Amino acid sequence: MFKFILFVLIFVLTSCSPPEKKEFQRGENKVSTSEFKEAIVHFDNSIKVAPESSWAMKSAREAARVSHYLAKDFTTAIRFYRHMVLYSDSPEERNKSQKEIAYLFFDSLQNYPQAIIEFYKLLQMSDKDFEIATYKLAIARANYYLNQFNQALSEIGEIVRLKITDDVLFDTVLLQGNIFVAQKSFQKAIFIFNDLLKRFPEKSEKENVPLTLTVCYEENFQYKEAIKILEALKNKYSPPEYIELRIKRINERIKNQPGAKGLHRK
């Protein structure tokens, strides 16, 4: 008799579980069997039943994780992260979710106009120089990819006035140099890249700043300077044949210059 009563109580309690909880549990069961699309449907149902409930929040967290990292469905993941931004009681979780949204648009979807919008939202959620600089650098990069060079340079101008680490400073100034190259402002780019080589020699080597600098010298008709850098790279660059080919090509350009051989602009 006791077992029967206990069974009835368990059945009643289970039956009385809120529908959003049941949908969450069904979703979890589908995750355990790698049925991710079906799991997301159940998590979605949980949220629709009671958007502000704790079970809806649990569903959003799990659905975002599954969509983002397991199903690689980034658009769906963004939808669940947005729910967390709207309904989470934790400022840290809201901030983290907004960050996931911004970087998904930037890195995974390469939707740079929307990424810019999302990073600006992040700026409103932060008062720390390092975070502000990081988000502004992402905005500058997005504008660079959109060929909106002046806007990118405007963001960079604000970044360098903040208290930032050397890593962020290097990335910011490197982007500035690349923007000048894209604008064909080679003299400005030359100044930037030479400065980077002096201040951050190891990082500059890893990012191929010397090679980029030779391109700037060559495009600016400063052939001797370009060859000087290439000669120094012979024993460092692989394959070395590429360097030899570059030097040969520059020498041919020098020979084809109007007037005396070896003419170059300083």
Image (spheres, rainbow, N blue to C red):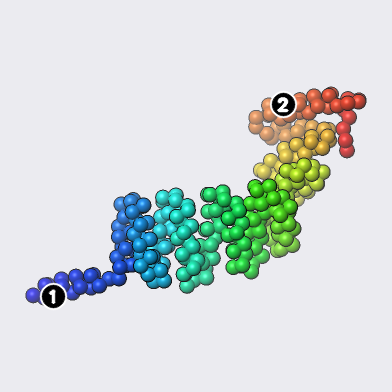
**Left or right of 240: which side holds 85?**
left
Q: Which mark is residue 183?
A: none
Q: Amino acid at mark 2?
A: Leu
Foreground residue, 110 or 223?
110
Query: Which of disc 2 and disc 1 is earlier in sequence?
Result: 1
Seen from this angle, which residue lies furthest front? 48
**Left or right of 41: which side holds 81?**
right
Q: Amino acid at mark 1?
A: Ile
Q: Which residue is mark 2?
A: 245
Crowding around mark 1 (Cα neighbors within 10 Å: few <14, some 14 to 19, many 20+) is few
Q: Residue 38 location, x and y as percent? A: 33, 54
**Left or right of 248: which side holds 165?**
left
Q: Residue 190 location, x and y as percent? A: 79, 43
Q: How far apart are the two marked residues, 1 and 2, measured between alpha carbons?
A: 88 Å
State yes or no: discs 1 and 2 in contact (Cβ < 8 Å). Answer: no
Q: Which residue is mark 1?
A: 5
Crowding around mark 2 (Cα neighbors within 10 Å: few <14, some 14 to 19, many 20+) is few
Vertical relation: 5 (above or below) 245: below
Foreground residue, 232 or 80?
80
Element on which disc 2 rests: helix
Asked where in the image residue 251 lies, by quadrant, the reply is top right
Can residue 37 be seen here? The reply is yes
The residue at the point 61 percent across, 67 percent down is: 124
Seen from this angle, which residue lies furthest left? 1
The residue at the point 32 percent across, 63 percent down is: 23
